[in-house]
Image: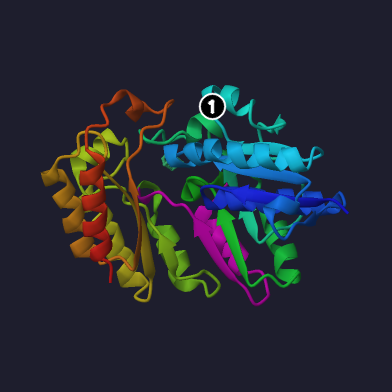
Amino acid sequence: MKKYWIITFGCQMNKSDSERIAAGLEKDGYKPASKMDEADLIVVNMCSVRQPAVDRIFGLNKKLSQLKTTNYKLKTILTGCILKKDKIKFNKIFDEIWEKPKKISIPSKFIPISNGCDNFCAYCVVPRTRGRLVCRGYKEIIKEINESAAKGFKEIWLLGENVNRYRSGSVNFAKLLKMADDISGDFKIRFMSPNPADFSDELIDVMAKCQKISHYLNLPAQSGDNEILKKMNRPYTAEQYIKLVKKIREKIPDINLSTDVIVGFPGETKKQFENTVKLFKKIKFDIAYISKYSPRSGTAAFRLKDDVPIKEKKRREKILMKMLK
Ligand code: SF4
């Protein structure tokens, strides 16, 4: 029996896609290898959002070449978010490049409800790699949640790059959550990633009232400085973000709050970074995912000078890490 190995970089969407690819391969008679060296097929599901992920793909080149010398039948496939310019280079490393993960329609506990994004945050390649926001029909999603619940999944994730911008006819994201909550079964619903700018009062109310909606929330702030937020093309201010968190905590006192932050965005001064420190002090996040800014071609920020030295980025990262509860 042929064996496969999947390497996933990046976000929850990619994990979901990898799960679907794995299920499709198993349907085709493959089984998972216990280590990469045993595989007949290696699929790399990549994310071009950050340069380090791209660098890691180039780092894999040597390993894949070595494996090919011992297993001449080994097939390698690259899929995920791939920029055109990177694709030319990756063509030399992989046997095949899938522009989009192969569509395999099996129920999954990770359920994409939309794909792409209309926001164009300055540091992000998603609108270019995944395209503009396209939402799945709510009936199809509810059916998939029903099936997943019936299969015994205890946690069902609803995924989208800007998940709370979801809309299908008159069904917005809050209404979709409410419908999912009405499905019988012993499971929790989680979602990511929401944009603070699209977080409505209706959504907060649904989260507060519905039993199955998890009280874990990842709310990416990205920065606590208004000028940097503007440069990032994030459509909210630090004050609006704080106000939103206050509202959420009032209605959902046991909310477990995490955030995403980028340190060392082009031009970020020490004073501007201090505003992110202030935001951390004020909010007291439970968890924070801190990234050191790295330029990605194809993004608006790529035109800006990456002028915060790596040493300083690391210092800022450390300061924020230390502030977590
Ligand atoms: S909201 Fe911004 S960061 Fe998130 S996927 Fe859209 S463009 Fe990228």
Residue of label 1 = 86
Q: Nearer the viewer, residue 256 or 260?
A: 260
Measured from the top left, where is residue 56 in percent x and y? 51, 41
The quarter of the picture where residue 186 lies is bottom right
Residue furthest toward the left?
A: 271
Q: Is residue 164 above or below residue 131?
A: below
Residue drawn 75% across the image and 53% down it: 38
Q: Nearer the viewer, residue 278 or 44?
A: 44
Residue 314: in magenta span: no
Q: Nearer the viewer, residue 271 or 199?
A: 271
Report the amino acid beneath label 1.
Asp
Instruction: Give the magenta part as a residue range.
Output: 168-196
Judging from the image, the colouring scheme is: rainbow
Specify whether 54 is left or right of 288: right
Q: Is residue 154 above or below residue 20?
A: below
Measured from the top left, where is residue 192 in percent x and y? 49, 55
Res 117 visible:
no
